[in-house]
Amino acid sequence: MEVFVQQLINGLTLGSIYGLIAIGYTMVFGIIGMVNFAHGDVFMVSAFIALIAFLILTTWLGVGSVVLALLIVLIVSMLFTSIVGWTIERLAYRPLRGSFRLAPLISAIGMSIFLMNFVQVTQGPRNKPVPPMLSDVIVVMQEGSYQVTISYKQIIIIVVTSVMLACFWYVVQKTPLGRAQRACEQDRKMAALLGVNVDRTISLTFVMGAALAAVAGTMYLMYYGVVSFADGFVPGVKAFTAAVLGGIGSLPGAVLGGLLIGLIETLWSAYFSVEYKDVAAFSILAIVLIFMPQGILGKPEVEKV
Amino acid sequence: MTDTLTSAPLAAPALREPLLAVRGVETFYGKIQALKGVDLDVNEGEIVTLIGANGAGKSTLMMTIFGQPRARAGAIRFGGLDITKLATHDIAALRIAQSPEGRRIFPRMTVFENLQMGAAVDGYVHFDDDLERMFALFPRLKERLHQRGGTLSGGEQQMLAIARALMSRPRLLLLDEPSLGLAPLIVKQIFEVIDELNRSEGLTVFLVEQNAYHALRLAHRGYVMVNGTITMAGTGRELLERPEVKAAYLEGGRK
């Protein structure tokens, strides 16, 4: 029971990070029907931006408060990563719009390889550490000698993720921008007929996806304390899996999928074997897709002709 | 090619420039030419009807006005401004609104959100007033306000498509086959609304129809399109009297 609760806490933390990345996949897929394979690497780049910002703040500028430093790092990382996301769409995807369907996909794979290698060359191939921070824990439950704990880091991750998702949900559901995004997703031509600037809306979708990936990247860096140029791939694939599992195109689905993948991974690691945790996550994906090809929250379209 | 009957919508000396002027427009789908040099005018305050058989190019003309697809030759002017090469959303911003072929309601948005989409061009300035106006014109929409667009019946979707277009306070309303697939009673209702808006607010309407009898009775002027060109033009009443129109579009003149 205690192990289970502990793994639940760990799983939710990890799942929050996957969920944040998954939103970027699902939104872009929803609006232009393309899997942005570079998104995992955007996440990795954001972690490096956070790393650099953190080191500048703490060593050069001497910001003492860790919480203040993290807040600034988060904002800086979101800002710069948004620019990265916007640039990628502009350079690698927009010129290919209206081309054959696979073209932007290939371009995305190219962009992924480029980002990975760019970071490897400029930042070096080794793991880059940040000093451990906020490692204090709160004991939630105690049973004999086993303590169920939640660390400040985990609390921050879960709180920040919830706040970001709430803001994001508000934008998509209640603002003219969010309506324009949903309109483009459902019928791009009609959206244009109603005065929506489709290209701008797509750009902003990439910006929003990148900003959420930057939140995930910053949290990842803080949680694990290291990042390397190759760290975009596996979380990227997992987040993509989460998006598909939840029903690609569905925003709540992406979050749900992320949490599920996080939980499956940690619970499997705790009860079975750490080595096969990825196998477990992807097996569940395969099983769900066999019985629910739309994903968990993806709905088959019902439309009147 | 154009057989002009009356005072001649095309040849008359223009006292004022028409609100919408289509000149020699040619549109292609790949190699297939859909419009072969279309000339057509819509003056301010008019209802103009374009009739023609399936595949004549009526809907293509509607979409070409919005640059989807773009005209490969010719010019389209709106309010004296050349809009042939403008981006689709910039054309919409000039207050041309369209209720397109197939209605194209956003299926996973509520009726309310669909109407909000229509009001975007107007900057939501008159949103509350306009919403009330739409409820007065189409009371059904009020009942369905928080239902998803995709769950509405065909007639309700048509009403929503027109209301959505009207929410932008258009200077020119393009209606593509509003009667398609609808029960005669609803068709009558929709045509009455169009007539009413034209009389009371001077709304300019460009209407594409296969339902030629109703459309020509409603319109001030009409055009007949065959295979991507305009073959006849005149007032609605005159076109109704033409034997060719009767034979081809009015069920052999039985109506």
Image (spheres, coloured by chain):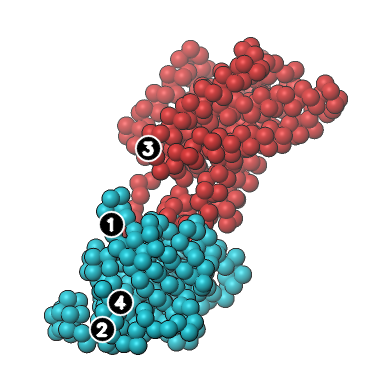
User: Measuring 50% from the left and 51% from the top, which residue is drawn there?
Assistant: A198
The hue used for chain B is cyan
Chain ID of residue with mark 2: B
- Of callouts 4 and 2, which one flags the residue occurring earlier in the amino acid sequence? 4
Near mark 2 (Cα within 10 A), the count class, few <14, some 14-19 or many ≥20, is many
Chain ID of residue with mark 1: B
| Cα distance in 3D space between marks 4 and 1 | 20 Å
Of badges 3 and 1, the one in the foreground is 1
Of badges 1 and 2, the one in the foreground is 1
Q: Position of residue A7 (x, y in %)?
A: 57, 23
Provide the letter of the chain coloured red. A
Q: Which mark is residue B223?
A: 4
User: Measuring 63% from the left and 37% from the top, which residue is drawn there?
Assistant: A82
Image quadrant where one finds the N terminus of chain A? top right
| Cα distance in 3D space between marks 3 and 2 | 47 Å
Does the CB distance between marks 4 and 3 fall below 8 Å?
A: no
- Please state which amino acid type lies under the numbered disc 2: Leu
- Please state which amino acid type lies under the numbered disc 4: Tyr
Q: Where is residue B154 in the image (x, y as percent from the top left)?
A: 32, 66
Image quadrant where one finds the C terminus of chain A? bottom left
User: Measuring 34% from the left and 61% from the top, which residue is drawn there?
Assistant: B26
Q: Name the residue under label 3.
A: A101
Are discs 3 and 2 located on one and the same chain? Answer: no
Location of residue A206 with respect to B202 vertically, above or below: above
Location of residue A23 with respect to A181 vertically, above or below: above
